[in-house]
Image (tube, rainbow, N blue to C red):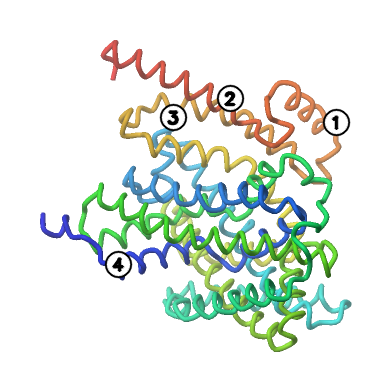
C-alpha cells in the first residue's frame, strides 16, 4: 500500500490528467465570452484579458486544489463547514446554475447560434430554435438516461479536432488580420476599470463553480493512478492543472485578440456566438462553417449531458422524492424551456445569479485552501460567509434586468449599495466586507483556541 501511495506519475500521465482538466473547463459554450469581450475592450484587450484570466483561468485551478486539499466529494461537502443548510442551498444553486437554468440551455443556444441559425432565413430562426432545442435535449435525455459513455469516448476524438480547427482559425486570423489591435475602438463600458470588467466577464465561464462541483472527478482519477496519498494528489492537481490552465489562458487571450481585431471588419455583434460564425465563414467559407457547426454541436452536447447528469445525480441524492431518471426528465424539460428564451436573455438573467454565487464560491475556495492552518474551524467559515452574503445579495438585486430594474425597490437597494459598500461601483462590493469577516473570524478563532474552546 505504501508503495502505491509513493508512486510518481510519468510525463505521459501528467499530460493525460492535464487533458482531463482541460476538457472539464474548456467547453465550446465558453468560446463566446472572450470573443465578445475582445470586441467590447478593443485596443484595451490586454488589461481585459488579465482580468478575464483571473476568474476564467486561475480561480478554476484553485477550485480544484480546494477539492483536493479538503478531500471533498463534491460541492455539498465543500460548503459543509458553514453549516448543513448553507451547504444544501449552495449545492442546489450551483447545480441549478450549471444545469437547467443557465449552462445546459446556453450550450444548446450556442450550438444553434453558431451552427444552425446562419443557415436559416431570418423569419424561421425563432421556430428553428424550438425544433433544434427539442431535438438537442431529447438526445441529451436518451444518452444520460442510459448512462452511456459514448460521448465521453467521442469527446476524446472531438476535442483534438475542435482544437485543430481553432488553431487554424488563429493562424489565418493573425496572418490576415481583420483589424489593427492598436487602433480598434474601445466601447464606452471598457474605457475605464478594464481589468475589473474583464474579471467580472470571467464569471460567465462558470468554471470556478464547475471546479467545485466536478473537481472530485479529477481528484479521483489521480488517486487511481497514485493511490490514496493526499499531499501528492494536491501536488499533481497543481502541476497538471497548471499545464491545463496555461493552455486555456493562451486560447482565451487569442480569442480576445481575434475579437478585438474583428472590429476592423464587423460591428459589435449581439454575442460571441454570432461573431464566431461570421469569422469562420469569412476565412473558411461555407465548408468551414459547416465543420464548425458539427463540432460545436457535438462538443456542446457532450457538456450538456455531463452537467445535466451531474444535476440529476446530486438532486436524487439530496432530494429523494424523485430518482435520478426523474430529476433528469425535469432537468431536460427545464433546459428546453430556458433555452427558448434565447441566448441573450439567458446571459442577462445569469448575470445576477453569478454576481451572487461567485463571491461565495471565491470565499469557499480561499478558506478551503487555507483550512489546514485553522483546522476547518466553523467560526471562520461562518463569520466570513455571513459578511459576504450581504453584499452578494445586494449585487444579485442590482444586476437584475427588467422588469425588476428601475423599480422603486431596485433603485433604493442600488442607492444603499453605492453609498455604503466600497468598490460597489465596479462590481466588487463584496471585497471589503469579506476581508472584514475573515479578520473577525480569525481573531475569534485565536481567542477560542487560547481559551481552550476548540
- Furthest toward the right, the residue is 123
**What distance separates the C-alpha of mark 1 from that of mark 2?**
26 Å
Q: Is residue 433 left or right of residue 110?
A: left
The residue positioned 62% from the left and 75% from the top of the image is 296
Q: Position of residue 81 (x, y in %)?
A: 39, 34
**What distance separates the C-alpha of mark 4 from that of mark 1?**
60 Å
Q: What numbered label is drawn on residue 408?
A: 1
Q: Which residue is mark 3?
A: 381
Q: Position of residue 123 (x, y in %)?
A: 88, 77
Q: Residue 189, can we see it?
A: yes
Q: Which residue is mark 2?
A: 433
Nearest to N terminus: mark 1 or mark 3? 3
The residue positioned 75% from the left and 22% from the top of the image is 419
Q: Secondary structure at mark 2?
A: helix
Which mark is in front, 1 or 2?
2
- Furthest toward the bottom, the residue is 287
Q: Badge 3: how crowded within 10 Å, few (<14), some, or many (20+)?
A: many
Q: Is residue 350 above or below residue 300?
A: above
Q: Is residue 6 left or right of residue 453?
A: left
> Residue 265's quadrant in the figure?
bottom right
Identify which residue, 413 or 171, lies in the foreground.
171
Q: Quadrant of the C terminus?
A: top left
**What distance separates the C-alpha of mark 4 from that of mark 3?**
38 Å
Nearest to N terminus: mark 4 or mark 1? 4
Identify which residue, 190 or 324, lies in the foreground.
190
- Furthest toward the left, the residue is 2
Which mark is in front, 4 or 3?
4
Q: Position of residue 247 (x, y in %)?
A: 50, 63
Q: What numbered label is drawn on residue 11?
A: 4
**What distance separates the C-alpha of mark 2 from that of mark 3?**
14 Å
Amino acid at each position: 500500500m505504501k508503495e502505491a501511495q509513493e508512486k510518481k506519475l510519468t510525463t505521459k500521465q501528467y499530460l493525460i490528467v492535464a487533458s482531463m482538466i482541460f476538457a472539464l473547463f474548456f467547453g465550446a459554450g465558453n468560446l463566446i465570452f472572450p470573443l465578445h469581450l475582445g470586441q467590447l475592450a478593443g485596443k484595451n484587450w490586454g488589461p481585459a484579458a488579465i482580468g478575464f484570466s483571473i476568474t476564467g483561468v486561475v480561480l478554476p485551478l484553485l477550485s480544484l486544489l480546494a477539492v483536493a486539499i479538503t478531500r471533498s466529494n463534491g460541492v455539498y461537502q465543500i460548503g459543509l463547514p458553514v453549516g448543513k443548510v448553507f451547504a444544501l442551498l449552495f449545492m442546489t444553486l450551483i447545480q441549478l446554475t450549471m444545469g437547467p437554468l443557465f449552462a445546459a440551455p446556453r450550450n444548446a443556444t450556442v450550438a444553434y447560434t453558431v451552427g444552425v441559425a446562419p443557415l436559416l432565413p431570418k423569419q424561421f430562426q425563432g421556430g428553428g430554435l424550438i425544433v433544434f432545442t427539442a431535438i438537442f435535449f431529447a438526445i441529451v435525455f436518451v444518452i444520460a438516461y442510459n448512462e452511456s459513455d459514448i460521448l465521453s469516448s467521442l469527446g476524446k476524438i472531438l476535442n483534438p479536432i475542435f482544437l485543430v480547427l481553432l488553431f487554424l482559425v488563429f493562424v489565418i486570423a493573425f496572418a490576415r488580420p481583420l483589424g489593427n489591435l492598436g487602433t480598434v475602438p474601445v466601447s464606452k463600458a471598457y474605457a475605464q476599470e478594464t481589468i475589473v470588467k474583464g474579471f467580472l466577464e470571467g464569471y460567465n465561464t462558470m468554471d470556478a463553480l464547475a471546479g467545485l462541483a466536478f473537481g472530485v472527478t479529477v481528484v479521483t482519477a489521480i488517486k487511481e493512478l497514485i493511490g490514496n496519498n493526499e499531499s501528492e494528489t494536491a501536488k499533481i492537481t497543481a502541476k497538471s492543472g497548471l499545464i491545463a490552465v496555461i493552455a486555456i489562458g493562451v486560447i482565451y487571450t487569442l480569442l480576445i485578440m481575434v475579437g478585438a481585431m474583428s472590429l476592423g471588419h464587423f460591428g459589435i455583434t449581439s454575442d460571441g456566438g454570432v461573431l464566431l460564425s461570421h469569422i469562420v465563414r469569412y476565412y473558411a467559407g461555407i465548408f468551414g462553417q459547416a465543420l464548425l457547426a458539427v463540432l460545436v454541436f457535438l462538443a456542446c452536447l457532450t457538456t450538456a449531458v455531463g452537467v445535466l447528469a451531474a444535476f440529476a445525480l446530486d438532486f436524487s441524492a439530496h432530494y429523494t422524492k424523485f430518482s435520478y431518471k426523474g430529476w433528469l426528465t425535469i432537468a431536460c424539460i427545464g433546459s428546453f424551456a430556458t433555452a427558448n428564451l434565447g441566448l441573450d436573455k439567458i446571459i442577462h438573467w445569469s448575470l445576477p445569479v453569478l454576481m451572487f454565487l461567485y463571491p461565495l464560491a471565491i470565499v469557499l475556495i480561499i478558506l478551503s485552501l487555507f483550512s489546514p492552518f485553522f483546522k476547518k474551524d466553523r467560526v471562520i467559515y461562518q463569520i466570513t460567509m455571513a459578511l459576504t452574503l450581504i453584499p452578494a445579495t445586494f449585487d444579485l438585486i442590482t444586476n437584475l434586468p427588467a422588469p425588476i430594474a428601475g423599480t422603486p425597490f431596485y433603485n433604493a437597494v442600488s442607492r444603499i449599495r453605492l453609498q455604503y459598500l466600497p468598490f460597489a461601483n465596479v462590481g466588487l462590493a463584496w471585497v471589503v466586507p469579506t476581508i472584514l469577516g475573515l479578520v473577525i473570524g480569525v481573531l475569534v478563532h485565536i481567542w477560542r483556541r487560547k481559551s481552550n474552546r476548540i
